[in-house]
Image (cartoon, coloured by chain):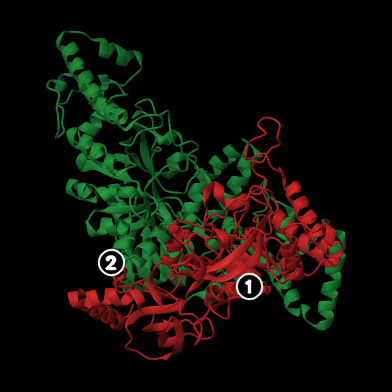
Amino acid sequence: MKHLRSTAQRLVSRGTRRVCVLAAAAALCSGAAHADGKLAIKAGRIVTAPDAPVIEKGVIVIENGRIAAVGKDKDVKIPWDAPVIDAPHATAFPGYVEAHVSRGMDRPNESPEIVIPFLTVRDSIDPVNFFFEDCLRSGITTINVQQGNDCIVAAQGMVVRPIGLTIDDMAVKYPAGVKMSASPRRGASAATQAQSLRRVFSDLRRYLEQLVQDKKDGSDRARREALYQGRDLEGEKSKGRAMEGSAWKVQGLELIPRGEIDEKQEPLLALVEGKLPAFIWCGRPADVHLAIEVARENGFLARTTLVIDPSCWKAADVIAAAKVPVVLQGNVLHLEIDPLTGKEVETFVPKVLHDKKIPFALSSLNSTNQALWFQAALCVGHGLPRAAALAAVTTAPSKILGLDKRVGSLEVGKDGNVLLLSGDPLSVTTWVERVVIEGRDAYDRSKDVRVQHLVAGKQPANTAAMNAEELDPSKVCCDGSDEKAHAKHLEAQKRAADKGEGGKDDEKKGDDKKDEKKPDEKKGDGSHEGHDHGDGAHADGAEGARL
Amino acid sequence: MSARSSTCIAVALTLLASDAFAASQAKKSDEQRSWTITAERVYTAEGDAIEDGEIVVEGGKIRAVGKGGGGDLKVYAVTPGLVDLSIRIDQGRYSVEQASEVTPHVRAAASLDVFDEAWLRAARSGVTTAMLNVPDRNVIGGLSVVVKTAGEPSAQARVVKADAALYGAIGSAPSSGNRTAAPRPEDFFVRRPTTRMGVEWEWRKSLFDAAAARVEPARAKPGDGELQRALDGQLPLVIQAWASQDIRTAVFLVEEARREGWGNPRLIVDAAAEAWREPQLLVRSKAAVVLPPFAPLGRTGDRAFFALDTAAKLEALGVPVALSGHDAEALEDRLCYQPGYAMRGGLSFASALAAVTLTPARLVGVDQRVGSIKAGKDADLVLWNGEPFQPTSKVVGVLVDGRLIVDPRQAANAPSSSNK
């Protein structure tokens, strides 16, 4: 927290707009930080994994960011010095995992014409981007941020957590893989794209062979270039290493100190050696073949994840045969007009993937509803077993990211990423009440000003968009715009009040005022004494609506 | 889904597997309009849900509703067919009458295209009755028609109520893209109005002229009759207005008409995303609203911000609320999921159900035929594999006038292990 504050102070000087965003961010993480300490969560119900039985009245103990114990409250001893979040009405669930997204940065695509695996989204991610706040709000605690789809071989991605004011605070795993596209980039044909993608690796091969040949010829151009560029030629970097990988190899690469390999080519070599994962975008079913072939020809198929458009369900057999996992981007439903009959054909894509036993993750890069839980719920409605639907937003993406030992379920030793939900994870009336990320109290709905905006239209105070009118809709209805109407309105109100009809109306106004006071009242209590269910009438309303 | 009903469906599927049964069923379903449907929950929209209920359908009408079991179709839940008051079937350039920006006499009923796939898409998501509106490119577009989304083969037979409402728009849609004749006078976009101001002017002028034509028949022009009926409140006046400023305009137009003695229009604000900002305006003018699909991050059409509790807030103030799919293609935007979003915003299940059934049916005066499950009404039913409106549930069966449009016995609609 100390570190966060100092960062905050530094940023504050940059401008008032930032201050507002920071204020909002600070409000969200206003709870005490427990990154290096302990935290105990007592929840009415704990669901540790998609297919795990429910633990009624359970306790989760988090120490140093990792889960130290989880079980029934009578079986788990809470350390005497651990702060306790007591949430008797909440369901604790693992934080959702986003396997591939191109948000949280200003522009997700570098020029599509060049091969740029030496760039990284690390330099582009904006920690105060609203996207990360929205992630907390919808329960996403682990996010793989990758470059956009308009590319050949693009920048390297990074797995982050949606808290922290600097990229280092956010980092979970770096690098998280190289992004590529098997679909035509902007302005290219499919054939050009295929050629460009293949040429990247043939160029790499030629480059490496030339390097070996130069070394054999006694040229030290690569070495001089490395020194000129200030590259490190010590330690591991001073040693050569026989080329690894399962597809093709360049003989004699052990002669080349690794530090002498051009930084622009090094990530590609890591790919071919199977040391770096690849995320390949497939915008059409036909692209799936290219993606799989290129990955196979160059030895990184085993570390490849296909990021697919819904139409790629048609290539499900090819995907299943290649045994690659996929991230479904876009919509869960594929809609197509049959060109002969003119009939509309709907295909629920996750069902196809599930039936073909393809490991898949859902993505918040969805055109209409970005909430992962909502998409998982749709999967259940469309015939997937509940465990499989929940796995698509927890364990499946964690496996895709190689983080299955850290996130995706609530097990001893894993990261303490816990959601406290107001009900069943997949019910439409359930809200994410609280989020704990690696033992840190990351989000509390009762203190979330933006959720009040989204739900009830209440503008957060001190933001640029603030408008005095919007804070009190009841006052404004005929404010100055039509005086006659206003007078009539007052008359009508008076008449209604005389008749005794205005009672309900006035009561409502009273309620509104009460609501607005509530957040202020709550500012005082930052402690963890109890799991608070609400921001006034709305939470109560939702409670009433629950089935 | 309880074990009991899963077994029932399993039995139904097994029966279906036998060729003879399938063949006879296929033949029968062509004309079959009588069914007995049983469900663990029957939500009639007329009162409390019936547990273990049974609906008897005969000749396309509901004959009886009550307790019972052992019907031809067994599902988890049944609701009335959904009613959507905001559907537009876009026929490209042929959709918009270009003769004028005010065409109250143009009838959507006259251009009904029953072959458009959008009807079936709506039907698949549970919409059995829909009001087809003329597109919003004209200021006053014309007369909407209420139709069944499937079933009867002819356009005429689909119509529940022709000329059910007068439809127009306020906001950017009727003016966007329009421009003056200067550069290319032959262009489609050489139209007035070109601003919101112009749109409002067209509205006021039209209403004034229609009122004036009553006194001076010589002033009458085509469309005045329709406008007069709307002014008199015989035809609901449906105005599309997404943003707060446009809802105000709609309300003030209607209030002006009342104040000036032109009549007493019944206002329905369509796509009223920002109705939450000034709900008192709607209470005051006794308007009803049709809400567009909920937007998870708030931003929706015409730069409006759509708060999640809009439906709950309006309903608490007594404003009639109907939800709509507003022609959405995306799965999550379809009408069957909208009541769920409204419940997330605080609306009760019963009110959410009413907002997609009885309320819209009443607003356009078709509630004697559709909108609830009641003996004597049309057999328009939606069958669900779980609690209605939850994203974990799916529309597995749809009946329109007793015809099975979506068959719950098909394998694709079989329920999964747990989806309540």
Name the residue furthest left.
A251
Return the chain for callout 1. B
Q: Nearer the viewer, residue A322 or A24?
A: A322
**Which chain is rendered green in the image?**
A
Q: Residues within 10 Å of mark 1 (few under 14, many from 20)?
A: many
Q: Determine whether A81 is above or below B315 in the image.
A: above
Say what amino acid the circle numbered 1 marks.
Leu
**Disc on res. B159:** none
Please provide percent x and percent y for residue B107: 62, 60
Disc 2 from disc 1: Cα separation: 46 Å
- Number of numbered discs visible in the structure rendering: 2
Please provide percent x and percent y for residue A483: 87, 60
Q: Which residue is mark 1?
A: B363
User: Does any portion of residue A530 appear in the rendered image?
Assistant: no
Q: Is residue B356 left or right of residue B211?
A: left
Instruction: Report which colour depicts chain B.
Output: red
Q: Which residue is mark 2?
A: A51
Please provide percent x and percent y for residue B415: 31, 72
Q: Determine whether A364 is above or below B414 in the image.
A: above
Please provide percent x and percent y for residue B2: 32, 80
Q: Nearer the viewer, residue B188 or A41?
A: B188
At horizontal 16% and vertical 22% (from top left) the residue drawn is A253
The secondary element bearing badge 2 is classed as loop
Say what amino acid the circle numbered 2 marks.
Asp
